[in-house]
Image: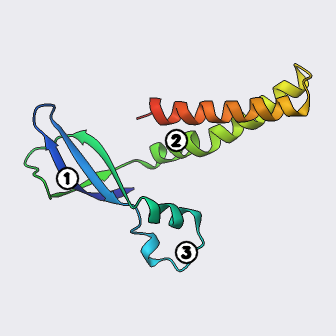
């Protein structure tokens, strides 16, 4: 998958460039954007920014193309979407069948594991 990003800031000292992408580009062509969860979120926060190592002959306002392999894209999609849900169900199953706790504890520990995995993904995976 290849995408075009705009350079909005360059830090020569640390050799980093800050990139900006319009996340609503695909949504602008979709007729279901008003009722779609992703479309609604994109309306709230339309742009995403992140930093990458500085490439040669790049200045503020330029556009750069970055590519991610399909394997990495699938891996990150699994880590961010599927793993927290699996943690929720797996923890609930363990609490029920190994520790023999009540349903309220299953729900509580399931949601705790969901949010722990979610936060670990957010802060540890770059």
Q: Residue 13's spot in the image, x, y percent? A: 11, 32
Q: Which residue is mark 3?
A: 34
Q: Is residue 21 left or right of residue 34?
A: left
Q: Which residue is mark 1?
A: 8
Q: CA distance from mark 3 to mark 2?
A: 29 Å
Residue ID at (10%, 51%): 59
Q: Nearer the viewer, mark 2 or mark 1?
A: 1
Mark 1 or mark 3, which has the lower sequence index?
A: 1
Q: Residue 118's spot in the image, x, y percent? A: 58, 36
Q: Residue 65's spot in the image, x, y percent? A: 25, 55
The answer to which image quadrant residue 113 occupies is top right
Using the image, determine if residue 89 lies above or below residue 43.
above
How dense is the environment of label 3, judged by Cα within 10 Å: few (below 14), some, or many (20 and up)?
few
Which element carries disc 2, helix, strand or loop? helix
Which element carries disc 3, helix, strand or loop? loop
Q: Is residue 7 left or right of residue 1?
A: left
């Amino acid at each position: 998958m290849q995408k075009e990003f705009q350079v909005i800031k360059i830090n020569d000292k640390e050799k980093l460039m800050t990139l900006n992408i319009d996340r609503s580009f695909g949504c602008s062509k979709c007729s279901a954007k008003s009722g779609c969860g992703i479309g609604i979120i994109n309306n709230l926060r339309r742009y995403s920014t992140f930093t990458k190592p500085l490439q040669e002959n790049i200045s503020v306002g330029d556009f750069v193309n970055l590519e991610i392999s399909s394997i990495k894209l699938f891996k990150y999609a699994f880590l961010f979407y599927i793993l927290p849900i699996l943690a929720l169900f797996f923890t609930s199953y363990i609490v029920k069948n190994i520790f023999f706790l009540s349903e309220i504890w299953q729900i509580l520990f399931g949601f705790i594991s969901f949010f722990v995995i979610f936060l670990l993904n957010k802060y540890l995976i770059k």
